[in-house]
Image: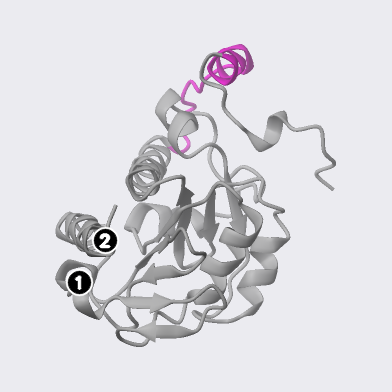
Amino acid sequence: MSDARLREEICRYGRSLFERGLTPGSSGNISLRLEDGGWLVTPTNASLGFLDPARISRLDAAGRLVSGDKPTKEIPLHTALYDTRGSARAIVHLHSTHAVALTMLPEIDPRAALPPMTPYYLMRAGETALVPYYRPGDPAVADAIRGLAGKYSSVLLANHGPVVAGDSLEAAVFATEELEETAKLYLLLRNLNPRYLSPAQVADLTETFGLDLPSHHDHDHD
């Protein structure tokens, strides 16, 4: 896909997310990794609903600005997820209401922020980690994401919002949307003793669709 077409795709998905209220004002950012190792990334203080393809930031493989406006200050969290998640080709970071609300609840497990509520949550977003609060743009958030060792494609930043990687921009957007809807379901059903997917049902999804779920890895959680 040409550079021009990729820029148009970022603008198209950004407008869709903005118009549906998934990231208000100038919040949120999108990046796309290019074949040469460089990136296209949305500029700082830019609304995802009103992006200009020509002003999208173009970074080289070392993260230096080549053209376009100054990039988002959230570059460290994008870099960390790309560095540890080898299959990632695009990352979407939003301030979507229900996902942010989820991060503030006391019972949330940092290793599995959401229970297995629906098959499409697991199929698109996998399982979701929660990392502690860092101020926006703090390079320390990169260390927190690197500490997850690439096991998660979807991560929630406490009191901030989701960061989701995909093997394409479309996949990252769809996974982010699925995460937001699942967070909404959780909040609607909280304290109502809902019926989640059973371990056997999760195992069946994992085998049938080849899911890469952190809880199915042989690693130490401690």
Q: Nearer the viewer, residue 106 or 111?
A: 111
- Amino acid marked by disc 1: Pro
The image shows residue 184 at horizontal and vertical percentages of: 35, 43
The relative height of residue 122 versus residue 37 in the rendered view (above or below) is above
| Residue depicted at x 37% and y 62% | 94
Q: Is disc 2 surrounded by few (<14), some (14 to 19) or many (20+) residues within 10 Å?
A: many
Q: Is residue 31 left or right of residue 11?
A: right
- Amino acid marked by disc 2: Ile
Q: Is disc 1 surrounded by few (<14), some (14 to 19) or many (20+) residues within 10 Å?
A: some
Pointer 1 residue: 53
Q: Nearer the viewer, residue 201 or 217?
A: 217
Which secondary structure, mark 2? helix
Q: Is residue 68 left or right of residue 133?
A: left
Pointer 2 residue: 10
The relative height of residue 117 versus residue 98 in the rendered view (above or below) is above
The image shows residue 126 at horizontal and vertical percentages of: 53, 36
Q: Are marks 2 and 1 in contact (CB under 8 Å)?
A: yes
The image shows residue 189 at horizontal and vertical percentages of: 40, 34
Which secondary structure, mark 1? helix
Q: Is residue 60 left or right of residue 19?
A: right
Question: What kind of colouring is applied to the model shown?
Answer: one colour
Q: Is residue 12 one of those drawn in magenta? A: no
| The residue stretch that appears in magenta | 190-207
Q: Is residue 191 one of those drawn in magenta? A: yes
